[in-house]
Amino acid sequence: MRYKTHKYFIAGRINLIQRSKIRELFERARKMENVISLGIGEPDFDTPENIKEAAKRALDEGWTHYTPNAGISEFREAIAEYYRHTYGMDVPMENVIVTAGAYEATYLSFETLLENGDEVIIPDPAFVCYVEDAKMAEAKSVRLPLREDNHFQPDPDELLDLITKRTRMIVINYPNNPTGATLDEEIAKAVADIAQDYNIYILSDEPYEHFIYGDAKHYPMLKYAPDNTILANSFSKTFAMTGWRLGFTIAPEQIIKDMIKLHAYVIGNVASFVQIAGIEALRSEESWKAVRRMRETYNERRKIVLDYIQKMPYISALEPKGAFYVFANIKETGMKSEEFAEWLLNKAGVVVIPGTAFGKHGEGYIRISYATTKEKLIEALERIKKALEEL
């Protein structure tokens, strides 16, 4: 039997979305042999045992049904409790919604607060989802440069210059992906003051808050502009729970109520037994011991990457104080970022992410993830060193 060729009509908004360059590079690398990836931003650790056991118990206890759209009350209270104990902030349970990771948290923020013609200020470089979320909300992205000589932090004066009567939101992400930068308190306060003065929302994406090193500290934007901030967070990085798809948003109660309306139609609710595992993650000392061990391991790897880079020609890096990335400067190679990533993959069998995957101001940089085993990391760095020495 022969079928006629069918012409499919796809909504125009889908054509606006760009496929991630990160994923494209991974797919190419997957077809090659003996490749080491320093690309993906995912912990190489397994989820702590006590969290997995809590999920198993929850299944046995019958946590297999729908929950309230905003999440199980005990879990929302555990999140509020965490912020009270960790940062001394009064967060009512009613200001929390449980989401399918920080991805959904950012999506809900854009769709709930922005509309056609609104402007959102997004750092450059920045994680890839923000610009695509803006497109789906029919908002205009206005890029704020993050520069190495400013430690990849926003310049408040430049931020002010970008604000117009159409500006509705500023995106902040610290500790930062892709640069590994942390945010100084005076900059956090300055951004908060600007948002409050101009009645602008801040979307503060903070999934790397527990991976900070040396004398760096984390300053939740919610602390400085509570009525303007939408805080997105995730269990993916902190507790190595990427596959669980568990996150949350904290925002003023009216915004949360409006987010719940959209969330109810997008996913309904996060899986019930996963939420029970989230309670265990937040309230068990065993979980936090695992987080401290992960941080110590990441810090050791961070030092290894920086030590190697110091010995390599044509490449340098500002010391990152957070996350698990090094944003290395490769301008002296004479290659563009994408060209360098392709060359390194073919020459050395190592995957790194071109800085331009995160915006045009990422040109001249590559992102190196050290969320991989020490042995693989050292082997990859040896390969990079050899390739650069032969350049």
Image: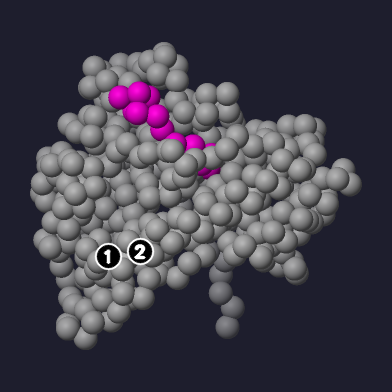
Is 158 or 134 nearer to us in this picture? 158
Is 263 or 125 nearer to us in this picture? 125
Please say whether residue 205 is one of the residues in the magenta stretch: no
What residue span does the magenta drawing correspond to? Answer: 178-189
Please say whether residue 183 is one of the residues in the magenta stretch: yes
Q: Position of residue 137 (x, y in %)?
A: 35, 39
| Mark 2–mark 1 distance (CA, rounded to whole Å) | 6 Å
The numbered dot on residue 289 is 2
- Position of residue 101 relative to residue 113, above or below, is below
Identify the image quadrant of residue 165: top left
Q: Position of residue 29 (x, y in %)?
A: 69, 61
Q: Are marks 2 and 1 in contact (CB under 8 Å)?
A: yes
Q: Which residue is mark 1?
A: 285
Q: Residue drawn 45% across and 16% down?
A: 158
**Quadrant containing the C terminus in the rendered view:** top right
* Crowd class of label 2 (few under 14; some 14 to 19; many from 20; radius 10 Å): few
